Amino acid sequence: MCQMTLDPAPPQTTARQSVTLLGMRVDRVTMEGALALAEEFIHSRMPHHIVTADASMVVTATQDAEFAQIVAASDLVTPDGAGILWATRRMGTPVPAKVSGVDLSARLIALSGEKGWRVFFFGAAPGVAEAAAVQMRERYPAANIVGVRDGFFKPEDEAGIVETIREAKTDILLVALGIPKQEKFIFRHKAALGVPVCIGVGGTLDVFSGTVKRAPVWMQNVGLEWLYRLAANPKKIHKVALLPKFAGMVLRAPRKA
Ligand code: UDP
């Protein structure tokens, strides 16, 4: 039965509270809290996996047991999107804020110069990661982007990609392959990569490069980003189709008293 409860923090990370939404853990974290944790992960030099959870991911986790386990084993699950905020409010255990992959990535890149953090962009169509790096260096001239690689590759290329990321002495790896491919890639190669902060960021490099425009802020705030994205790219219909399913599952789930 779907339910939401306050859970203790996972033991391997800084103490914090989580909620369970339709069986998936979402951490009660703010942007400042997520940035502090990322810094802690970098100082530890140990590999960590940050998941940015949106509504489609919660549904995917109910359908893909391997994926659900990967999310459960990750070091931080941020609430990425109005759908998650709505669902946790409705269930009686709200999370404090939206911490999206796009916003978290931008903040980390902004800090990368002064902190000396080495950022690698991996994913999206050929040319997009390069264009994203150009745009982000324009926005944050001190940005320390040390490598880029597109996200279209054969299984036999994976070992070489891992080696390239490792050789770049990457501190922060943005993996933009879409859900659940990016989380599975990170889980599979976490130890070999040895990167302290690996984040699955979906369409973030498309947004940074200007290939895809973000919805206006008012649409993001009222939870209509999905509609904007669908209008911009009708191929995303399979993803959008998960949203009514998510809403139905949340509405049927028992609320905390
Ligand atoms: N992508 C990729 N390799 C693949 C499949 C997808 O690099 O094999 C990229 C795609 O070009 C896009 C991103 O992954 O940049 C997925 O973006 P989307 O907004 O669909 O992500 P999601 O909604 O799954 O987080």
Image (cartoon, rainbow, N blue to C red):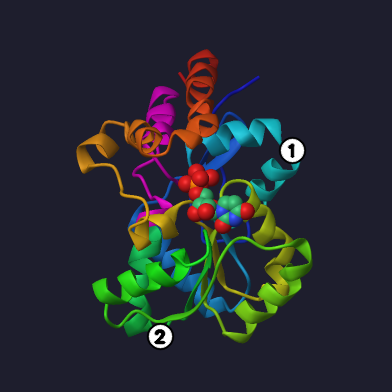
Specify which label sits upstream in the sequence, 1 or 2. Answer: 1
> Element under label 1?
helix
Residue reaching furthest left?
218
Residue 80 sits inside the magenta stretch: yes
**Relative side of 124 to 10, left or right:** left
Please report the residue visible at 66 percent of the width from the left and 19 percent of the height from the top.
Answer: 1
Q: 192 or 156, which lies in front? A: 156
Q: Does the residue at mark 1 contact the one at mark 2 (Cβ under 8 Å)?
A: no
The circle drawn on residue 116 is 2
Disc 2 C-beta below 8 A from ligand 1: no
10 Å neighbourhood of mark 1: few (<14), some, or many (≥20)?
few
Q: Which residue is mark 1?
A: 65
**Relative side of 46 to 93, left or right:** right
Please report the residue visible at 32 percent of the width from the left and 84 percent of the height from the top.
Answer: 114
Q: Position of residue 231 (x, y in %)?
A: 35, 33
Q: Which region is colored magenta?
A: 78-103
Taking 77 as reference, is 146 above or below it?
below
